[in-house]
Image (tube, helix red, strand yellow):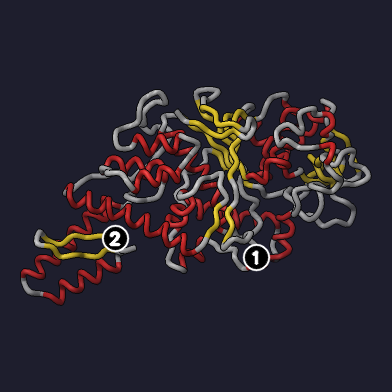
Amino acid sequence: MLKLYNTASRKLEAFKPLGEEVKIYTCGPTVYSEPHIGNYAAYTYWDLLVRALKVNGFKVKRVLNLTDVGHLVSDGDEGEDKLEKGAEREGKTPFEVADYYIKVYLDNYAKMEFLPADVVARATYYIEADMRAVDLMTEHGFTYETTDGVYFDTAKFADYAKFARLDLAGLQAGARVGFSSEKRNASDFAVWKFIQPGEKHAMRWDYLGRPGYPGWHLECSTIIHEVLGEPIDIHTGGVDHIPVHHSNEIAQSYAAYGHDLSRFWLHCDFITIDGQKISKSLGNTYTLEDLEKRGFSAMDYKMWLLSGHYQGTRNFTFDSLEAAKNRRLNWRNRIASLLQSAGPVALSSPKIDDNFGGPPPSAPPADGFDKILSAVNNNLNSAEAFAIIDNSELGLDDWQKIDELFGLRLIADSPDLTAEISGLIREREEAREKKDFARADEIRDELARRGVTLKDTPGGAVWQYIK
């Protein structure tokens, strides 16, 4: 049975879907600059969530949004739009900036072996739906207009403080949102921003007779309503979303549509680097490309992330990444040993989709894999699952399921690679028998370039991965 920690209840709860299909929404990136490795932590954990659901036999429909307008430099309602700022920095239009970094993100998602979302939703594709949502909130008496925008009146939503356990009485003006003389409450937030005279803002749409753009929080509520419908089963995000972004989503969704937004809320914590916050000023905003230049793959980094728990603060160091790389290499060589012992095999590349033939939620998992899945089913405890893998005797079928569950490419290329390596090994043995040692050495060097080393034994040569 899958159990998840629900932020809404602050409890570990057994997961049961609301319908035949598990509806999941993931707060995606704001696509205005080069993503760093910290940006992929949350998506690694939510990829595990989707994989776990599918391995448990659930059908999943997942939406990932891309914020390409409306996210100001603060979580409040002050400052520049991040896309506008990125455009000024790069001498491009905001739309060009968004297009470029969306491609970077999606290319890196593929490198990280994330299962693709069923719907990837750009905020700018839902502007008219945003306007309809603001109209509904206004019609229901939850908004008021100021000179700089349309604001949500949090005093009108009695449960506003409930989700984040906020102390509204003690909330000082400016503590978490900008506060102006026109705002009625410090916790009020803009659902629509008006562009002021003389203000440069390339991304603009006419609403209420004035040019403007949606507030950042609005897009998630709108996309969920348009694509999934309320309530959804699971909403995911970072812990920083709890007091502002997700509290606002809940309020405006209820005000517009009259429904609770989500049954489960899952939040992951941050990673730090060498004990410090990730910051350009500190020079520690490593990208996946930076890791590759140092000899680490995206899979090594994913291995490091999954070696801890999604709710824990993780501290990244290159020593810990090296340990994760070696751990993954050890697992791959355990698989290599099994492949050579089994002889020619036909392992299919792990691929999970809605037709994945896993057991239904009520059925027990397969032998050898049961403890691993049970650990993951306990609030996505990948750290415990990895410890079990380290200390268990596993067969090829087990490793196949492990790759399906974690997406670490442990055996994804094994069929072709095994056949090719076997052919080169046979050719090398033949060269040695003919005393053509020059050719035998050439083959050994070729295998080394492919990341494989050979060890000559009385029973013949055996191979292992070296990278």
**Which residue type does callout 2 highlight?**
Tyr
* Residue 420: mark: none
Q: Tag 2, which secondary structure?
A: strand
**Which residue type does callout 1 highlight?**
Lys
What's the distance in space between the residues labelled 2 and 1, CA to CA? 36 Å
* Residue 465: mark: 2
Q: Quadrant of residue 96?
A: bottom right
Residue at the image position 51 percent from the left and 25 percent from the top:
16
Residue at the image position 81 percent from the left and 47 percent from the top:
177
Q: Position of residue 405 (x, y in %)?
A: 40, 41
Foreground pick, 121 / 142: 142
Specify few, some or many for label 1: CA neighbours under 10 Å numbering under 14, 14-19, or 20 or more: few
Q: Quadrant of the C terminus?
A: bottom left
Vertically, is 97 above or below 16? below
Q: Answer left or right for 255 relative to 327.
A: right
Q: Quadrant of the N terminus?
A: top left
Vertically, is 337 above or below 54? below
Query: Is residue 335 visible to us here?
Result: yes
Toward the left, the furthest residue is 434
What residue did someone put label 1 on?
Answer: 280
Vertically, is 413 above or below 251? below
